[in-house]
Amino acid sequence: MKAIQITDKAAEHIKALLAKDPEAIGIKLGTETHGCSGLGYTVDYVKEASNEDELVEDKGVKVFVDRKSLLFLLGTQMDWEDTMFSTGFKFSNPNEKGRCGCGESFHV
């Protein structure tokens, strides 16, 4: 089982992001202390692979998952949303126990 699932829309957007930065080999997904609920998702470019990350290769993209965040992210689906009200990565995380009112942070 892969640590996370990447939807087709998310993979397409990751490819578009990587095309803008030729040095990047993938993106890194993690969590950090954020917002009123405790944790927020982080997404950054990866220029060099690290043994500190769990590599998920799917649909032609590489997503490196921060090992310190792995337990919080296990089973998460990473999607891309582009609507009139929201544009960005959307995470469906089975480990979330709740979210803050604005939806920017979560707790497990």
Image (tube, rainbow, N blue to C red):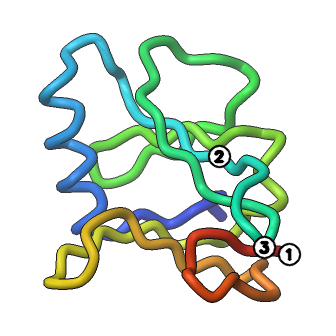
Q: Secondary structure at mark 3?
A: loop
User: Is residue 57 shown above or below 103?
Assistant: above
Q: Secondary structure at mark 1?
A: loop
Mark with earlier residue (1, 3): 3
Quarter of the figure that contains the C terminus: bottom right
Badge 2 marks a residue whose secondary structure is strand
Relative side of 94 to 9, left or right: right
- Label located before the other in sequence (1 or 2): 2
Q: Quadrant of residue 84?
A: bottom left
Q: Nearer the viewer, residue 32 or 27?
A: 32
Residues packed near mark 1 inside 10 Å, few (<14), some (14 to 19) or many (20 plus): some
What mark, if any, has residue 30 been given in the picture?
A: 2
Q: Nearer the viewer, mark 1 or mark 3?
A: 3
Which amino acid, by three-letter code, is at mark 3?
A: Ser
As shown in the figure, which amino acid type bears the numbered disc 2? Gly
Q: Which residue is located at x 38 percent, y 64 percent?
A: 89
Gap between marks 1 and 2, in whole Å? 14 Å
Image vertical order of residue 108 relative to residue 29, above or below: below
- Measure the alpha-carbon separation of dots 2 and 3: 16 Å
Task: Please name the residue shown 70% across and 39% down the image.
Answer: 66
Earlier residue among tags 2 and 3: 2
Of residues 35 and 49, which is closer to you in this image?
A: 35
Q: Which residue is mark 3?
A: 37
Q: Which residue is mark 1?
A: 108
Residue positioned 27% across, 77% down in the render: 86
